[in-house]
Amino acid sequence: MSTPTSPSDTSPTSSGPSHSGPTEGLAAPARPVTGSSERSAVPARAVRPSSIANVVLVGLSGSGKSTVARLLARRLGWTYIDTDRQIQAQTGLTVQQIFAERGETEFRALEAAMVREVCARARQIIATGGGMFVDEGNRAGLLDGNLVIYLESSPEVLARRLAESVRREPRPLLADTDLVARLAELRGQREHFYRCAHHVVRTDRRTPREVADVVADLIRKA
């Protein structure tokens, strides 16, 4: 697969995990919080697939993964998959209910099973849960044969986007907390894992449709 060269969206990063392909230029990732439950083994290296089975969007809650995935699926005629929604449909429980009734460990096991399920199919635009890409096995599975794109946003922008939605639909890792502070904490824990994606696309000053345009261009050049 050829390497995208758009200077505004795919300039190489100067730090973080090694990549076989370029990503949009960003500041060095925050160091993960020592002792965090979300720390894992050394991130798997992103090896650019020779052909794309699926497109996978990763990032924190509020980064626009689901909205952008729907737009891309419609544009490409591919299937739209939201992994959290799929887990909810299979279990009959919301993510919040799974965390409350079964615990985070059970939810992460359901996520791992979902990764195996979606990676067995092709021609999908997959919006992942915020923590799915942190797990080493999930990360390896999603990077294998798919094009993975990290939708990056600042904690302040994410908090503004989420302020109303978390009241309507509580999110277990964002409940009863200062949203900006919590999102900054999660970003510090997860950023170096997200950076294993093949590309990073900034979303702060872009509408979902503009983000979809950037991602569609990366897919065309892949």
Image (cartoon, rainbow, N blue to C red):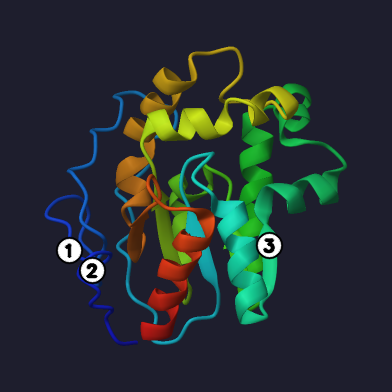
* Amino acid type, mark 1: Pro
* Amino acid type, mark 2: Pro
Provide the residue designation for mark 2. Answer: 22
Quarter of the image where the N terminus is located: bottom left
Res 37 quadrant in image: top left
In terms of depth relative to the viewer, which is nearer, 161 or 53?
A: 161
Provide the residue designation for mark 3. Answer: 81
* Amino acid type, mark 3: Ile
Provide the residue designation for mark 1. Answer: 12
Side (left or right) of 26 relative to 58: left
Q: Is residue 169 above or below residue 47?
A: above
Q: Residue at x 68, y 66 (%)?
A: 80
Q: Mark 3 or mark 2, which is nearer the start of the sequence? A: 2
Using the numbered discs, state the Cα–Cα distance from disc 3 to disc 1 in whole angstroms.
29 Å
Q: Is residue 34 above or below residue 138?
A: above
Side (left or right) of 72 relative to 84: left
Marks 2 and 1 in Cβ contact (< 8 Å): yes
Side (left or right) of 165 relative to 191: right
Q: Mark 1 or mark 2, which is nearer the start of the sequence? A: 1
Q: Decide if residue 120 is in sight here.
A: no
| Extreme residue in the right direction | 92
Q: Residue at x 53, y 13 (%)?
A: 177
